[in-house]
Image (cartoon, rainbow, N blue to C red):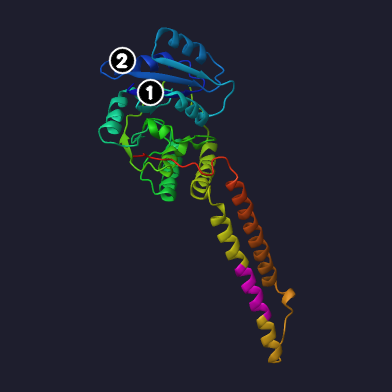
Amino acid sequence: MNISIVIPLYNEEESLNELFQWIAKTLEKTAFTYEVIFVDDGSRDNSWKIIQSLVEKNRQVKGIRFRRNYGKSAALNEGFKIVQGEVIITMDADMQDSPEEIPALYQKITAENYDLVSGWKQKRHDPVSKTIPSKFFNGVTRLFTGIKLHDFNCGLKAYKLEVVRSIEIYGEMHRFIPVMVHKAGFTRIGEKIVHHQERKYGTTKFGLERFVNGFLDLLSILFVTRFGKRPMHLFGTIGTLSFFVGGAITIWLIAEKQYRLSHHLKVRDVADQPLFFLALMAVIIGVQLFLTGFIAELVSRNAPDRNHYEIREKV
């Protein structure tokens, strides 16, 4: 099979039939074989009934239904488990992503050998309340990760099959799939300018809180991918530095007191100085961080996937 299209959705009953007809019309013009996987993230409307109807009428359609709303990351992760195509396309169900971009995305993966191609909605049909925070979010992500993409959160993406088999998406990590892919060792990450449609049905399911959550998720994924198998390198380094800074300040205060005593100068008790308590706090924090790193290292070494590594190929 050439293409698997994974579409997570939540309360999108108005658009599902029209979206599938658009996908089918686009791909019938090509020689591609394809499947469409709708993942219903606990919708409370008639979305699942429509998906069932599509499955009955079209052999290319598959459906997954969650018992409750788990989020877009969970929907994508479950969809990725059953895909069969050599190229995986993800897109949103609100019809703001155009299926007519699919053939070009497929060609960038197969002909240009990209591991992941992310859509870039250069011209967006969204209110300023979404576009300005999105630009800030993307800029911060580029700065922290070094991955040169303009639109990390675009739902329209294309992947090689081996890429989606190598990552696990959870929480709200769908915003950082390019980061996860890069950390998994797939470095050929590109982007393509895609057409962004105006919303035709319904309203957005994401509020402003996604930007706060997104930043916290970014810090989380950077920590997990960089220090997940060696937490002592982070906690131990910071803890040791804090301990020695606190210790050095304490020694300096004691040495200064001894110097003043030996030269009959006015002496202030070490414990009466605020700097002493700051030094003491630095020593305590240093010890705590070191012990945190030590415990995290023990947990990491006993994890079932402690020696799990992504092997590219064997000869």
Q: As shown in the figure, which amino acid type bears the numbered disc 2?
A: Lys
Q: What's the mark number on residue 4?
A: 1
Q: Is residue 223 left or right of residue 134?
A: right
Most extreme residue toward the front is: 315
The answer to whether one can see residue 201 in this image is: no
Residue at the far bottom: name it.
263
Q: Quadrant of residue 263?
A: bottom right
Disc 2 or 1, which lies upstream in sequence? 1
User: Compared with residue 291, is residue 216 higher up or lower down, i.e. above or below?
Assistant: above
CA neighbours of label 2 inside 10 A, class few (<14), some (14 to 19), many (20+): few
Assign a secondary structure to mark 1.
strand
Residue 286 x/y as whole percent: 63, 62
Q: Is residue 250 magenta?
A: yes
Residue 37 seen from this side: yes
Q: Nearer the viewer, residue 282 or 33?
A: 33
Residue 295: where, in percent of width, then height? 64, 52
Could you classify mark 1 by the number of other residues whose Cα lies within 10 Å: few (under 14), some (14-19), or many (20 or more)? many
On whether residue 119 falls in the magenta region, the answer is no
Mark 1 and mark 2 in contact (Cβ < 8 Å)?
Answer: no
Q: Which mark is residue 16?
A: none
Question: The C terminus appears in which quarter of the rendering?
Answer: top left
Q: Amino acid at mark 1?
A: Ser
Q: Which residue is mark 2?
A: 25
Q: Is residue 28 above or below residue 113?
A: above
- Give, as a single range, the part of the protein colored magenta: 244-254
